[in-house]
Amino acid sequence: MRLILTTGAARLESWQERGFSADMHYMQRPAATYLQPTRLLEGARSIVSLAVRYAQDPHAALRPGYGRVARYAWGKDYHKVLPRLLKTFLASVSQAIGHQPKYRVVSDAVPLLEREIARQSGIGFVGKNTMLIKPRIGSYFFLAEVIWDIELFDEAAKSLPILTCGTCQRCIDICPTSALIDDYTLDASKCISYLTIEKRGMLRHSERRALGEWIFGCDLCQDTCPYNTLALGSNTPPDSADFAHGAGSGSQLELEKLLDLRTHAQFIDIFAGTPLTRAKREGLLRNALAVAVNTERVSLSEIIARVAEEDESPVVRATAVWALGELARLEGSRAAERFVKVLQRVSKRDRSPEMRLEIETLQRV
Ligand code: B12
Ligand code: SF4
Ligand code: SF4
């Protein structure tokens, strides 16, 4: 069927104009940029849109001293796994048409309106949580596209799903940061997924608090969705073992171990080949410090004091000073003394703009 991507473009433009793309510069190009598969493959004539299931196990109760990772990131990096996974499918198409067509497999990392393409291809509908939802399957899947230089026809696309959210608004109600707006729109600047994965540099105090237990991504608006209830209770394995809980860093990360990662090399040793590299060492440690405060892990104060003075990243050091102060409030006078000593030392020694600003803010509150 012929895709009419201009409907998606209007929605994208309005989203950009309302400032909902936050500082994701790769989402701020002219809308036309996201409508042209020929920019991604010269001679492109058709797109096959695929939904590839990732892990669907329910989130377990949070272990003390740990933080949460969103389900899509439990296993190996999907950007690398998907092209490998599609090899057999691609080979079967070549065999059926008698030659090897020119193609490109893409997912997530390119300017393309993937959800709109999937919607118009008949995979599912867009919910109020903005996820592409496939009836009877839910929304726990990646979207991937094969762009070809051959013409393909898809009967399924003739009947688009007619299911919708109806009067339900569970996702809007559960979102802790009110990032979902009641017109099928998400303000990314408020979304925990954006704050933990895409936002670089310092988080504002309110943003650190907003993370709750999440170190990387967020699943709340999907976990509450009735379309996912079946998936969560079904024990259905992901479409690739590489996306399973045990294939990567899993669903919970130990805060102390994260705070001990002093160098990029140590970070890569543990997280190479997983989606968590996107946040970089600096982002993950910053988020872990926020989760330590939100989950009141006073037992981590000692290591946090070291991080505040020794870490190579000014973002991490400044966030650690804040975390130490917050935890000291819960701990009592000895902790308060330690906090004041650390604060005095970093005030003298640490000239980074991040630390200057953090100290100024702490003095104001
Ligand atoms: C930028 C981005 C983000 C941003 C912004 C998300 C957003 N909702 O816009 C942030 C960092 C917050 C984010 C978070 C997540 N993301 Co993301 N993200 C993207 C990315 C790169 C672009 C999305 C985009 O264009 N946003 C702009 C808005 C305007 O477009 P849109 O939401 O896609 O909606 C379009 C259509 O659906 C349609 N449309 C929208 N609403 C409606 C309503 C009606 C009635 C109709 C008719 C049409 C329609 O028009 C829109 C414009 O074309 C895509 C990959 C890609 N290239 O598409 C992945 C993608 C959307 N993300 C994905 C995932 C898995 C996530 C997370 C679940 C990860 C996590 N657990 O933390 C969360 C989910 C948060 C949420 N509720 O959306 C998957 C979603 C798969 C699915 N089933 O939908 C994608 C497709 C990546 C992939 N290839 O698998 N993401
Ligand atoms: S991913 Fe989390 S923060 Fe983002 S919209 Fe959904 S519930 Fe809200
Ligand atoms: S929780 Fe309800 S409103 Fe939100 S996407 Fe699912 S069905 Fe739609």
Image (cartoon, grey):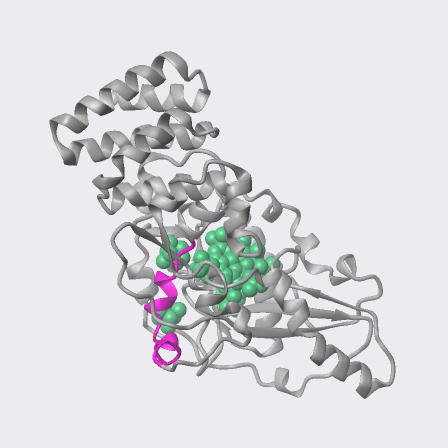
Which quadrant is the C terminus positioned in? top left
Residue 310, image quadrant: top left
Q: Which residue occupies the foreground of this view, 68 or 242? A: 242
Q: Is residue 181 visible?
A: no
Residue 355 on image: x %, y %: 39, 22
Report x, y in % for residue 144.
Answer: 62, 68
192 relative to 92 in the view: left or right: left
Residue 271 % position (x, y): 51, 51
Above or below, comparing residue 294 to residue 309 in the picture: below
Quadrant of the rendering where the N terminus is positioned: bottom right
- 65 or 193, which is in the foreground? 65
Q: Position of residue 284 (x, y in %)?
A: 44, 44
Q: Is residue 134 above or below residue 355?
A: below
Residue 219: say if magenta. Answer: yes
- In this rendering, the count of numbered labels is 0
211 relative to 149 in the view: left or right: left
Question: Height in image: 303 above or below 358?
Answer: below
In percent of the image, x 71 and y 70: which residue is there?
146
Q: Main secondary structure of the magenta part?
A: helix
Q: Residue furthest top?
A: 348
Q: Quadrant of residue 289?
A: top left
Q: On screen, 342 above or below 241?
A: above
| Direction from residue 144 to residue 136 in the image, left or right | left
Name the residue: 12% across, 31% down.
332
Frontmost residue, 260 versus 11: 260
Quadrant for ligand 3 reads bottom left
* Residue plotted at (59% across, 72% down): 118
Specify whether residue 235 is in view.
Answer: yes
Q: Is residue 101 magenta?
A: no
Front residue of this view, candidates 316 and 116: 316
Q: Which region is colored magenta?
A: 217-233
